[in-house]
Image (cartoon, rainbow, N blue to C red):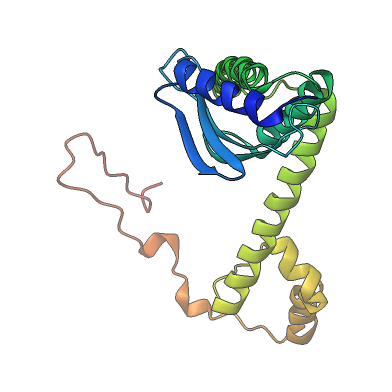
Amino acid sequence: MTDYSEEQRNELEALESIYPDSFRVLSDAPPCFTITVTSEAGENDETVQATLKFTYVDKYPDEAPSYEIDSQENLEDNDISDIITLLDQQTEENLGMVMIFTLVSAVQEKLNEIVDQIKTRKEEEKLKREKEAEEAEKVFFHGTPVTIENFLSWKAKFDAELAEQKCKKQKEEEQAGKIKLTGKQLFETDHNLDTSDIKFLEEAGNSVEVDESLFQEMDDLELEDDDDPDYNRVDLDSE
């Protein structure tokens, strides 16, 4: 007949010797204790940690002990889920034998893997940021390559904006009374200008009188210039 109490007592003594700094007894009946497991240091001395809580059942090791993660540091929810799954697998494989050391060793390896994954994840994030910065720099210095499609799109937008600005400016000038019509625009807006000169002459007819007194005989004009030494007076009467 198996003496479960003896096997449990012997394992507790062995665990206390193996993990003197992290082993802690919580109760004797039923035997309950914790073991804190810390990963190896990563590249920047980062670590992950899990405190495992075990409770013996009466027929341990023929029956699985109760276990849970009592506390943790730097672990994600999915990491905790992976550790519990690992404990389930190891417990099933080691039924009938004292197994706490085996379980703790498996968790130790898992934590080391998690630290390596953190390192890999940080390196990938760093490379991603560097690549994004490089792409942004390329866009800044080289701009968007010109194609027929994006040029036509830009030109259509530019022409529409230009027409809108021109229309807006014309409306503002009209409202301010500053717009000036060209000769062509005047004739287009007022067709009476086409025949205005003709109507003026028709209305005047032969009634235009000329004042002959405004004109003098050429003989009465004195065209002398005594100040000019080259001037030769011509006597018109003598001729």
Which sits in the foreground, 52 or 18?
18
Quadrant of image for the N terminus? top right
Q: Residue furthest front?
A: 1
- 176 with respect to 222 (left or right): right
x and y percentages locating residue 116 in the rendered image? 58, 14
- 38 with respect to 169 (left or right): left
x and y percentages locating residue 84 in the rendered image? 72, 33
x and y percentages locating residue 58 in the rendered image? 73, 39
- 72 with respect to 68 (left or right): left
Q: Is 225 situated above or below 222?
A: above
What residue lies at 59% left-to-right and 18% top-to-bottom? Answer: 108
Which sits in the foreground, 51 or 135?
51
What residue lies at 44% left-to-right and 69% top-to-bottom? Answer: 216
x and y percentages locating residue 166 in the rendered image? 66, 57
* Quarter holding residue 46: top left
Which sits in the foreground, 23 or 200?
23
Q: Is 62 situated above or below 167?
A: above
* Quarter holding residue 198: bottom right
What residue lies at 71% left-to-right and 44% top-to-bottom? Answer: 158
Which sits in the foreground, 121 or 143?
121
What residue lies at 58% left-to-right and 21% top-to-bottom? Answer: 10
Q: Is 212 situated above or below 26?
A: below
For residue 120, say whether it is visible: no
- 210 with respect to 237 (left or right): right
Numbered marks: total: 0
For residue 33, say whether it is visible: yes
